[in-house]
């Protein structure tokens, strides 16, 4: 099965992540980088017939508990993919990248 090329506009994703979930520029970059890596891997399309778009990222992160930070939301989603399909841990964002408020 030929996979269609992934498309995650990182600039647009960073803007949407900031608008929807807040966080620092550093966490926006980390999450958007992992989203692009996930899209490039083709895993979601293989496992779920889902092309990763900005809208798909935002929708899935919005399902996470409300009290979760951006990195926690991303890792929550990746954790659910790991439980369902396996081999998604490589797309986690290191929790220490999360900046704590001063």
Image (cartoon, rainbow, N blue to C red):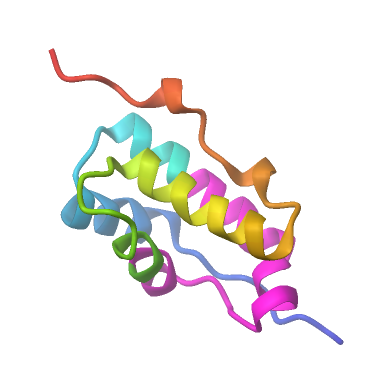
Q: Which residues are magenta?
A: 32-58
Position of the C terminus by quadrant? top left
Relative image position of residue 96 (x, y in whole percent): 43, 20
- Within the magenta stretch, is there residue 34? yes
| Quadrant of image for the N terminus | bottom right
Farthest residue to the top: give it: 102
- Is 97 positioned to the left or the right of 63 in the image? right
Q: Residue furthest right?
A: 1
- Frontmost residue, 85 versus 90: 85
Residue 12 placement: quadrant: bottom left
Name the spot of residue 45 as percent of width and height, x first: 68, 76
Asked which quadrant contains residue 38, the reply is: bottom right
Q: Residue 75 location in percent, x, y?
A: 48, 45
In the image: residue 22, left or right of residue 51:
left
Specify the principal SS of the magenta part. Answer: helix
The residue at the point 71 percent across, 64 percent down is: 85
Judge whether 33 appears above or below 39 on screen.
Answer: above
In the rendered image, the residue lying farthest to the front is: 83
> So how many labels did they put on this image?
0
**From the viewer's perspective, is residue 14 above or below residue 16?**
above
Q: Residue 40's image quarter?
A: bottom right
Identify which residue, 39 or 83, lies in the foreground. 83
At 26% from the left edge and 59% from the top edge, which residue is drawn? 16
Q: Residue at x 44, y 55 (%)?
A: 10
Residue 30 in picture, x, y percent from top left: 46, 37
**Left or right: 62 in relation to 57:** left
Q: Residue at the left extreme?
A: 102
Looking at the image, residue 84 lies above or below residue 15: below
């Amino acid at each position: 099965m030929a996979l269609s090329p992934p498309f995650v506009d990182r600039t647009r994703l960073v803007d949407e992540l900031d608008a929807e979930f807040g966080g620092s520029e550093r966490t926006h970059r980390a999450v958007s980088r992992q989203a692009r890596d996930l899209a490039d891997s083709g895993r979601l399309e293989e496992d779920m017939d889902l092309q990763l778009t900005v809208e798909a990222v935002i929708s899935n992160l919005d399902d996470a508990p409300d009290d979760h930070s951006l990195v926690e939301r991303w890792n929550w989603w990746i954790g659910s993919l790991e439980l369902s399909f396996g081999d998604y841990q490589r797309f986690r964002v290191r929790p220490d990248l999360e900046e704590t408020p001063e």
